[in-house]
Image (cartoon, grey):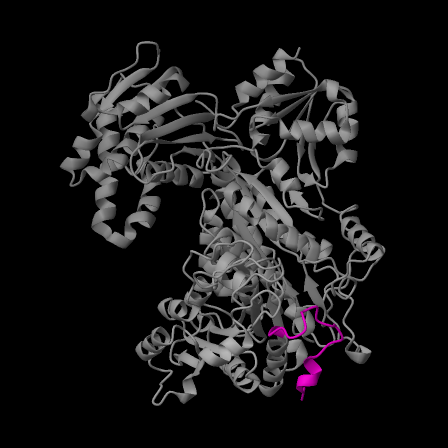
Amino acid sequence: MATFKDFRNDVKPNWCPGCGDFSVQAAIQRAAANVGLEPENLAVISGIGCSGRISGYINSYGFHGIHGRSLPIAQGVKMANRDLTVIASGGDGDGYAIGMAHTIHSIRRNIDITYIVMDNQIYGLTKGQTSPRSAVGFKTKSTPMGSIEQAVHPMEMALTAGATFVAQGFSTDLKELVALIEAGIKHKGFSLINVFSPCVTYNKVNTYDWFKENLTKLSDIEGYDPANREMAMQTLMKHNGLVTGLIYQNKEHPSYQELVHGYSEAPLAKADLSLNQEHFDKLVAEFM
Amino acid sequence: MINQLSWKVGGQQGEGIESTGEIFAIALNRLGYYLYGYRHFSSRIKGGHTNNKIRVSTTQVRSISDDLDILVAFDQETIDLNYKELHSNGVILADAKFNPKKPEDTQSSLYAVPFTEIATELGTSLMKNMVAIGATSAILDLDIHVFEEVVREIFGKKGDQVVAKNMDAINAGFSYTKEKMDGKVPTMQLEKADGKHRMFMIGNDAIALGALAGGCRFMAAYPITPASDIMEYLIKKLPALGGAVIQTEDEIAACTMTIGAAYGGVRALTASSGPGLSLKTEAIGLAGITEVPIVIVDTQRGGPSTGLPTKQEQSDLMAMIYSTHGEIPKIVIAPSTVEEAFYDTAEAFNLAEEYQCPVIVLSDLQLSLGKQTVEPLDFSKVEIRRGKLVTEELPEIPNKGYFKRYEVTEDGISPRTIPGMKNGIHHVTGVEHAETGKPSESAANRIQQMDKRLRKIENIHFKTPVYKNAPHEEADLLIVGFNSTRGAIEEAMDRLAKDGLKVNHAHVRLIHPFPTDELLPLVRSAKKVLVVENNATGQLANILKMNVGYADKITKFVKYDGNPFLPHEVHSKCKELF
């Protein structure tokens, strides 16, 4: 059986020292091993940005696509081979700006993949512009007078869009993050995990210390029930979204694969591609 | 006796004009006639003039006809917009309800038949279309029972009574026209057809059927005219094969999901029209650099932007060859008949996997939506070839080394593993990469990988890169076209031969890489070359000049008013050159 070390490769990440993404990478590797995956049965699909490089740093099948489109690529991979574990990943710009439509529609569609967003509230790779997760007043190169747009609230948005699995982690809390990713992989349907992954180079506001001061663990809230969507929404609103843990999970809702009519139990990638003559003749006869 | 007939039914969109034409055409197709239908419609659901022009012939036809024998009109607008197509013996059958007026400058005859009144007396005015079919049958001297089977198929679900009522309406239209107008209405009797059962389908049906036959098991698409039929057909048919279609949130998702699925190892398709292709271009570049085998259908319509969404045009040619930033290997094929649309789409999946690049099946609105009789498709001609897809077990690579998915090879094509394959792990990225897929910016690697990718399509094998009807070693004229202009060109050729001109015809079927070697001898040996295309700038003419040369003898003949070429237009233009 593979261990987390089997999910490491020889590529040295080009992230800045101290970047939160290192922990996310480690958490994915540990979670993959913990759920009993072999490297060839995991596909990590990523977008563009600092965090998008993550698919190249894990010893598994990996696809580093185009900006904002990790989700449709990941869904295509899963549809082609339902036996694979598919993880999509990227940054907050990737998932909540250019790729926002895919995020919402992936939630609605509920294909059984896990989406991990490394949320640093800034555009890092392009050297410090505002992101849809930047708070009002946040000063960046593209908002020198401070951001005047409202920040996106991804967890609340996900609940509204009909998400069946919503979780949030913090990159320094590796234990919790590994558990959330494991739960996301095991969840039958689309799982969204937003991870606060601080940018040490361009975000001097939302720092490690800032998160430590402001985050509340859901496990510390007495009576918190992740099966209760209303409670999830109220708790998020009360804490301005700054919570970590499993926010909401609906274990009853079937995944897209279970609902799609006629969809093969065996992976499509292994399908017999030939039609028989009889089947073809039947199709032709419908046009006569 | 006549061996072909042109019939048009017109009225307001949403009035059942399409189904009237459909019932008429299916019945005649089953008698063994060759049909060719072309719909004029607008980008709206209700209202606006629409018509369905159907050509009936005892031999195969691939173009709408120059003129019209019978015009069935449900409103005055239909007469005013279409009467000029009628030849001097033509007939207008108009609903008496709107007091039809015959324009002064036509020799054709107008007969007012109370379509609506007869239908209303029989139960509902909705059946006025059936009355019109009956009236048409009277002129053609057709046995109205030929419609019974089709009417039963369409209305059977609504019960026997509805079927009977509709047949009554056809009968009443027939009797009225025969009895009340006996002697006044000219009859046009069609020669008997061969009675063979042939398919009656649109190009999009053939594309979708070709995809199924070619092993496509997944499609991601976004609705758009005139491509949606492909998705709708596969949604109905893929479940029986275990496959699936996803209607995505947008065109970008459609293309990237197709890329994901193809990377995952399934034969995957997406289909759209111009606006969708514009949105897909970044993703097409991704498929190019990552060498993922996807098939994309582009059914061209009038552009740019929303342009003429329901009208014929062939203006995406350059975009399909060049669009996406940077340089990638890409194959563009262009079927010119419905039969070719079937074979080409099936073959596109082989080309995609063999050359590991995006393949675009280029169609146009006339080919995609023109409903026509199709010769039997030979399923045994369809092959499944998967190129260098690794099927055997792979040896373990020491020290967790990556599989060389982008190995530099002589033909540029590398062995391909898919996720799930043990010891096949590699990285895939739109960033320039080395043989294992890991990013690399080294100049030497860049040149190696670029050359490798572009080398793949240098010698691609496509069975008929150019359809040639070139009987003359030295021709007065070579006519060149692509996609649906084939029918109009072929008919013009017959007429030009009668005029005593030596004319060759080349229809380009492989658009990219351009089949210069195939075309060069034909261009060289012709005195003049006319390139017929539905766009304003002469895109094919320019590509021909660029690749083949002889710019001084190449003339473009363009049409970009939204309508297909008519045979007489091509004929006259050719005559003008001499």
Q: Which residue is drawn at 23% across and 45% down?
A: B164
Q: Which residue is drawn at 63% across and 42% down?
A: B323
Residue situated in front as seen by the camera: B181 or B205: B205
Q: Is residue A278 visible?
A: no
Q: How many marks?
A: 0
Q: In this view, does B255 lie to the left or right of B237?
A: right
Q: Which residue is drawn at 75% across and 32% down?
A: B547
Give the main secondary structure of the magenta stretch.
Answer: loop
Indicate whether B105 appears above or below A46.
above
Q: Does the magenta stretch include residue B322?
A: no
> Where residue B42 sits in the image (x, y, percent)?
38, 34
Q: Is residue A19 magenta?
A: yes
Q: What stretch is highlighted in magenta?
A: A1-21
Q: In this view, does A39 lie to the left or right of B168?
A: right
> Where residue B167 sits in the image (x, y, percent)?
25, 41
Q: Is residue B84 visible?
A: yes
Indicate whether B239 appears above or below B453.
below
Q: In this view, does B462 lie to the left or right of B185?
A: right
> Where residue B504 sits in the image (x, y, percent)?
70, 24
> Where residue A44 sits in the image (x, y, percent)?
61, 71
Corner quadrant of residue A37: bottom right
Residue farthest front in this picture: A145
Residue situated in front as seen by the camera: B226 or B567: B226
Residue situated in front as seen by the camera: B21 or A8: A8
Corner quadrant of residue A150: bottom left
Indicate whether B68 appears above or below A255.
above
Residue farthest left in this picture: B121
Quarter holding the N terminus of chain A is: bottom right
